[in-house]
Image (cartoon, rainbow, N blue to C red):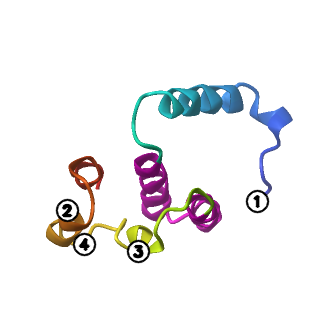
């Protein structure tokens, strides 16, 4: 299976960019957005995205242990580790 090029994608990239611009400016903490992106990559089982979001999180200075707990751990320990917004995002 071949990857889709930007040329072939048409307006898809523009739509994704618009959505990301909204998320970037919606008022959520940057750390929370990175944790959500990492968790979505886990749910989607996308190794490429996991690697990318892991590297972005490290670049932003996010504690690696938070990425370990980004996978829901039963709620209680997760909620004790993070703020209430991060707990709800899980």
Q: Give x and y (percent) for residue 82.
A: 27, 60
User: Between residues 6 and 51, which one lies in front from this camera angle?
Assistant: 51
Q: Nearer the viewer, mark 1 or mark 3?
A: 3
Instruction: Return the residue nearer the eye: 75 or 10.
Output: 75
Looking at the image, tell me whether mark 3 or mark 2 is earlier in sequence order. 3
Q: CA distance from mark 3 to mark 2?
A: 14 Å
Mark nearest the camera among 3 and 4 is 3
Q: CA distance from mark 1 to mark 2?
A: 41 Å
| Residue position marked by numbered label 2 in the rendering | 79
Q: Is residue 34 above or below residue 75?
A: above
Is residue 55 shown in magenta?
A: yes
Q: Earlier along the polypeptide chain: callout 1 or callout 3?
A: 1
Q: Which residue is mark 1?
A: 1
Residue in view at x 81 percent, y 37 percent: 6
Element type at mark 1: loop
Q: Spatial distance from mark 3 to mark 4, Cα to Cα?
A: 12 Å
- Disc number for residue 73: 4
Left/right of residue 48 with respect to residue 23 in the rendered view: right
10 Å crowding of disc 3: few (<14), some (14-19), many (20+): few
Of the numbered discs 1 and 4, the one sitting upstream in the chain is 1
In the foreground, 75 or 81: 81
* Number of disc labels: 4
């Amino acid at each position: 299976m071949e990857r889709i090029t930007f040329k072939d994608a048409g307006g898809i990239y523009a739509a994704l960019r618009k959505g990301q611009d909204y998320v970037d400016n919606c008022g959520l903490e940057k750390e929370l957005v990175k944790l959500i992106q990492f968790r979505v990559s886990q749910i989607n089982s996308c190794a490429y995205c996991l690697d990318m979001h892991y590297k972005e999180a490290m670049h932003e200075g996010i504690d690696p242990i938070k990425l370990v707990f980004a996978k829901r751990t039963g709620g209680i320990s997760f909620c004790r580790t993070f703020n209430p917004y991060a707990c709800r995002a899980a």
